[in-house]
């Protein structure tokens, strides 16, 4: 996008001139010095004719890549600019988490069940439904569960925040603007028939621009890629080495062709599993907790019933 400005023709003569005038009236006599703007404008027109600017998004992206190669912009800057350009062509339906893979809370569930789901999934916000998953009645912040712990007599409904609904066709640019202006971080995406199609968060939108955003599920420097959860199960990073998984669980998963557990699980499954899917290997259930960029970031790993702990 180019940003320009217009200059109104001068109707009076200035007493001092600090720079060449932008333009001359066609009735000005040619008795003085030539205006520097005339040959410069002609040169610009010739350059534009010989080297026209980009006429499409793809050409503009190629121009950015060329600018990076000539060290005019940093690689990180190019990636962000490309993300902005590509995001303009995307809608909520392109970046949402599909309805079957949404982590929801039942308004009639007990406090213990609600807490278990929050701990297992690790999200900070949850859509809450009543009677059926398609009937979203509000959004619960995980931190609000603390209020129920201290005051069990509270009704869960009083803790719900209003749910925001957006159509699948809503552009990500417009959606990001709404997120910022309304101070809202999650929206329920509905299809053309008014049914729940999925959900989208402000993080999903921003990641289209800046790439992956580190969150509470991401590895920190110097920390292990295998964690013990409150229910005794294990949380395993998708990029954890197979040897580390074998040692932690006392199993013998093959490590000849694959370096990471995510690659092995995807090979066993025939494709990269989606969030909510489970793949079983060597007596272990690998339940997908989080995916990013076409790969699994975190598994919840439990043993098959009857399997012996190491």
Image (cartoon, helix red, strand yellow):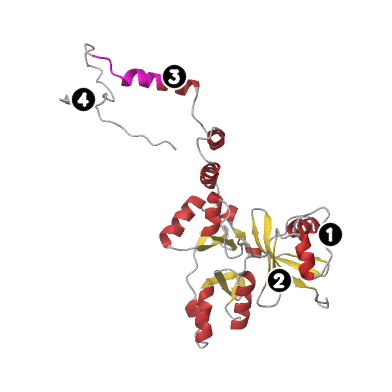
Q: Tell me the residue that label 1 is attached to.
A: 254
Residue 36 shown in magenta: yes
Whether tag 2 and tag 4 are in contact, CB under 8 A, the answer is: no
Mark 2 to mark 1: distance in Å?
20 Å
Which tag, 3 or 1, sits closer to the chain's start? 3
Query: In the image, is 14 to the left or to the right of 83?
Result: left
Tell me if mark 3 has few (under 14), some (14-19) or many (20+) residues whose alpha carbon lies within 10 angstroms of its own: few
Extreme-front residue of the structure? 222
Q: Is residue 297 above or below residue 84?
A: below
Query: What is the secondary structure assignment of the residue under circle 2?
Result: strand
- Which quadrant would residue 272 be assigned to in this image? bottom right
Q: Position of residue 151 (x, y in %)?
A: 50, 87
Which tag, 4 or 3, sits closer to the chain's start? 4
- Which quadrant would residue 287 be assigned to in this image? bottom right
Q: Tell me the residue that label 3 is attached to.
A: 46
Query: In the image, is 101 to the left or to the right of 125?
Result: right
Mark 4 to mark 3: distance in Å?
28 Å
Which tag, 4 or 1, sits closer to the chain's start? 4
Q: Nearer the viewer, mark 4 or mark 3?
A: 4
* Magenta stretch bounds: 33-43
Q: Is residue 110 visible?
A: no
Q: Tell me the residue that label 4 is attached to.
A: 17
Mark 2 to mark 4: distance in Å?
76 Å
Q: Tell me the residue that label 2 is attached to.
A: 234
Q: Is residue 48 visible?
A: yes
């Amino acid at each position: 996008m180019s940003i320009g400005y217009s200059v109104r023709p001068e109707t009076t003569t200035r007493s001092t001139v600090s720079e060449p005038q932008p333009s001359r009236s066609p009735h000005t006599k040619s008795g003085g010095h030539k205006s520097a703007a005339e040959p410069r404008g002609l040169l610009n027109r010739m350059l534009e004719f010989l080297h026209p600017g980009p006429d499409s998004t793809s050409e503009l992206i190629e121009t950015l890549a060329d600018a990076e190669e000539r060290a005019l912009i940093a690689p990180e800057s190019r990636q962000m600019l490309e993300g902005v350009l590509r995001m303009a062509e995307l809608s909520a339906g392109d970046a949402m988490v599909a309805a079957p893979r949404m982590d929801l809370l039942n308004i009639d569930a007990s406090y213990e069940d609600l807490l278990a789901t929050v701990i297992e999934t690790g999200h900070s916000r949850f859509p809450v439904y009543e009677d059926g998953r398609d009937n979203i009645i509000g959004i619960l912040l995980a931190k609000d569960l603390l209020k129920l712990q201290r005051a069990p007599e509270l009704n869960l409904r009083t803790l719900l925040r209003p749910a925001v609904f957006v159509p699948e066709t809503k552009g990500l640019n417009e959606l990001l603007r709404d997120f910022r202006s309304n101070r809202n971080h999650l929206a329920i995406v509905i299809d053309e028939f008014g049914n729940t199609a999925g959900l989208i968060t402000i993080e999903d939108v921003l990641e289209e621009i800046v790439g992956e955003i580190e969150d509470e599920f991401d590895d920190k420097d110097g920390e292990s890629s295998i964690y013990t959860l409150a229910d005794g199960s294990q949380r395993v990073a998708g990029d954890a080495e197979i040897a580390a998984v074998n040692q932690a669980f006392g199993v013998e998963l093959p490590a000849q062709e694959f370096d990471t557990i995510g690659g092995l699980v995807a090979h066993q499954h025939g494709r990269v599993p989606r969030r909510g899917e489970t793949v079983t290997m060597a007596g272990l259930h690998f339940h997908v907790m989080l995916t990013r960029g076409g790969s699994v970031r975190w598994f919840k790993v439990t043993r098959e019933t009857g399997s012996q702990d190491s």
